[in-house]
Image: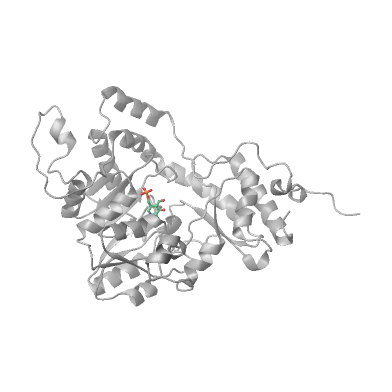
Amino acid sequence: MGSPPTAEDRPLAIAGGRPQRDEYLVFGQPLVEQPEIDEVVDSMRARWLGTGPKVARFEQMVADYVGVPHGRALNSCTAGLQLSLLAAGVGPGDEVITTPLTFAATVNAILHTGATPVLADIDRHTQNIDPQRIVDAITPRTKVLMPVHMAGRPCDMDAILAIAAEHGLLVIDDAAHAIGAEYHGRRVGSLADASVFSFYATKNIVTGEGGMVTTTRQDWAEMIETYALHGLSRGAWQRYSDDGFRHYGVVLPGYKFNMMDLQAAIGLHQFPRLEAWRDHRDRIWEAYDEAFADLPLSVPAPVEADTRHARHLYTVQIDLDGLSRDRDWIQEALHHENIGTGVHFIAVHRHPWYAQHMPWVEGQFPEAEHVSDRTLSLPLGAAVTDADVADVITAVRRVVLAARGGGS
Ligand SMILES: Cc1ncc(COP(=O)(O)O)c(C=O)c1O
């Protein structure tokens, strides 16, 4: 007599079975609670919607937290990356070294300054840029290093800062994933010439769209503020507040990248919950690590001592040799189980525009390509409940075990 069927034996939804859950678990959904709703309503009632006192308070809150004097809030991290590069004096003819395992925004921000992005491969175990590959990529045109703290795991900043010092380079870290991360006892956001956070809707702290540059450099902070609002010598808040109207001068051709008070209103109440939400993310992380230990997947390697992961993304690497299905099939099967997942990332050089316009070729960044083929991000966040975690664990186990046997 065979053993009785277990929950893991029942047919997958992709093969016509009943989905793991009835309600779709949307990947990366933020937790939005009453205090931020009230604060947004307060801004609307006060009829001060654009950049104003709430943005200033939010900037101070984040700068104080990371331990630097200046925070400049913008409408995205992408804008912050671009403006930090402009503050660094980057332009046509310069090269900026970054990672192939990142979102398009990192590379686009470099391109929009007229500079050339140069990719240096990652270490597949940390998924962060490999300092040795940075050294290999340096040329006389290199001006800035732009590491990305992938998934919230701090890069090897000691090595990166030492390389920058030795070669006279600036460092602007893409900290889109890394609010709350610490490296050797210091908060990410205080380690480089400038750091740029994202508060996009899926991030650990959200403002809808939004980002912030943190820096110790007052001149950069001032330049970023000016660039972010058309290049005006003073912002709308200073021009139109009850202090009376003041004339402005356009001191450079700027952009329209400023954050609104409506957005900062959300951030002001999200931010104080950062630590509690990170603890919640920690618990989910541990539950996943334990539940997937026997599956043909590798779970994220622990961080080094004295370093804290921001726990932005929980990414498993699918062991393609141990399975007869690929990552995309597993993702599709989970989608049928009503579980949304993400892919962070398809390596930059594989996207059509870069493949066509940049000198990068398949095979050039084997470590990033390895991750790009195998990585899958599972639901992790303040809004993910214990019941959601149980569903994800059961569904991932069923789908991966089915993928081992041919998948149905
Ligand atoms: C690594 C990385 N850099 C930059 C960005 C851009 O952030 P934003 O959407 O706030 O511009 C993202 C967005 O997800 C990202 O993942």
Kindly indicate the quadrant of the structure image that contains residue 354: bottom left
Q: Residue furthest front?
A: 356
Residue at the far top in the pictured view: 45
In the rendered structure, the answer to whether residue 25 lies left or right of residue 345 reads: right
Way the structure is coloured: one colour
- Residue found 26% across the figure and 24% down from its top: 46
**Residue placed farthest to the right in the image?**
1
390, 51: nearer the viewer: 51
Residue at (63%, 65%) from the top-left corner?
A: 320
Q: Does residue 229 appear in this view?
A: yes
Residue 364 at what x, y percent from top left?
45, 73
Residue 81 x/y as whole percent = 30, 54
Q: Residue at x 37, y 67 (%)?
A: 358
* Figure check: 270 above or below 184: above
Residue 100 placement: quadrant: bottom left
Q: Nearer the viewer, residue 299 or 408?
A: 408
Q: Position of residue 97 (x, y in %)?
A: 33, 67
Q: Nearer the viewer, residue 66 or 341?
A: 341
The image position of residue 210, as x and y in percent, is 34, 43
